[in-house]
Amino acid sequence: IMFSLFISFMYINTRKKLYSEINTKLDILSEILVSSIKEPLFNYNYETAGKIISAFLEDEEIGYILVKDSEGKVIIDKIQAVDALSPDSPTLLYLTLPNSTE
């Protein structure tokens, strides 16, 4: 019984740690991405913004990026090539741009 409890505790603890690490990485990537595409989007330069997002999609842990404006209108909707997605963990990176460009 003690062994089962120990294994259960280790599983839950490891799972929480992994989720925390993934969320931290996604928070950092989101901040970098928003900083990188804010100016191109403000200037309606969607080609440059698309290239920046494509570079982010090269990270094997990111499978899909959706960028919406503050009113909910989809601006950019990109997914990794299907053959590049790992079956166990493509991650959704969802960004909503603020009203201003501060």
Image (cartoon, helix red, strand yellow):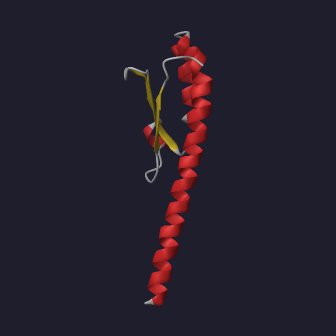
Judge whether 95 appears above or below 69 on screen.
Answer: below
Judge whether 37 appears above or below 26 on screen.
Answer: above
Residue 36 visible (yes or no): yes
Q: Residue at x 61, y 40 (%)?
A: 28
Judge whether 64 appears above or below 46 on screen.
Answer: below
Judge whether 23 appears above or below 58 on screen.
Answer: below
Quarter holding the C terminus is top right
Task: Residue 43: give x, y in percent of width and height.
Answer: 56, 9
Residue 59 visible (yes or no): no
Considering depth in this image, is 48 or 34 the residue closer to the camera? 34
Q: Residue at x 38, y 20 (%)?
A: 71
Considering depth in this image, is 100 or 12 the residue closer to the camera? 100
Considering depth in this image, is 39 or 80 the residue closer to the camera? 39
Q: Quarter of the image holding residue 66? A: top left
Q: Residue at x 46, y 46 (%)?
A: 90
Task: Residue 86: give x, y in percent of width and height.
Answer: 47, 49
The residue sitting at the bottom extreme is: 1
